[in-house]
Amino acid sequence: MSHFELAQLNIALMKAPLESPLMAEFVANLDPINALADSAPGFIWRLQTEEGDATALRPLGENVLVNMSVWRDVESLQNYAYKSAHADIMRRRKEWFGPMSEAYLVLWWIPAGHRPDVAEATARLDLLRRNGPSAEAFTFRQPYPPPA
């Protein structure tokens, strides 16, 4: 058993409010996609409110959605993100979300059992944006192993 788990944060700039017709299909898919994550091999935890998702949490602005979760390892998260029904939703993201000029996804290792908060996650995203990938803040394209 590893002494570390993988944390991830991704953010998205909404093209319209969640209540709008433009976002209806995205909203309709939240519960099934979150349930898929919850049952995915390697899934440990995700940021959510009592309603079961994180869409009500807007620490980065009213138009920015925040998704944060913890996984056993990079491979588990990659399998969920790119090899499950989640990938079908990701292919449609341009329908609902605008382009971002900076990094919008960051990965980092945390001690097993630790649950990051949004401040920690956004600090990692800022680190990635400032310095590029490193052992402290990285991406799928340039992953780093857990600390020794």
Image: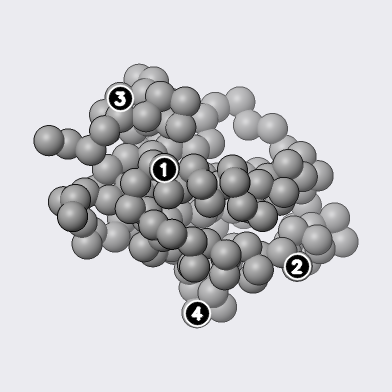
Q: Nearer the viewer, residue 108 or 83?
A: 83
Residue tagged 4:
50
Task: Give the mark, 2 or 1, whose residue is nearer the N terminus.
Answer: 2
What residue type is disc 2 on? Ala
CA separation, marks 1 and 3?
18 Å
Which quadrant holds residue 147? top left
Q: Residues within 10 Å of mark 2 (few under 14, many from 20)?
A: few
CA separation, marks 1 and 4?
29 Å
Rendering coords of residue 111 (x, y %): 19, 51
Is residue 123 something that shows in the picture?
no
Q: Secondary structure at mark 3?
A: loop
CA separation, marks 2 and 1?
27 Å
Residue tagged 2:
28
Vertical order, 122 against 145 (above or below): below
Task: Give the mark, 1 or 3, whose residue is nearer the N terminus.
Answer: 1
CA separation, marks 2 and 3?
36 Å
Q: Is there CB contact under 8 Å for labels 1 and 4?
A: no
Q: Quadrant of the C terminus?
A: top left
Residue tagged 3:
134
Task: Give the mark, 4 or 2, whose residue is nearer the N terminus.
Answer: 2
Q: Residue furthest right?
A: 21
The residue at 43%/31% (across/down) is: 139
Q: Is there CB contact under 8 Å for labels 4 and 2?
A: no
What residue type is disc 1 on? Glu
Q: Nearer the viewer, residue 140 or 57?
A: 140
Q: Residue furthest bottom?
A: 50
Task: Say which of marks 1 and 3 sits in front.
Answer: 1
Q: Residues within 10 Å of mark 4 (few under 14, many from 20)?
A: few
Vertical order, 128 against 1 (above or below): above
Residue tagged 1:
75
Rendering coords of residue 72 (x, y %): 33, 53
What residue type is disc 4 on? Glu
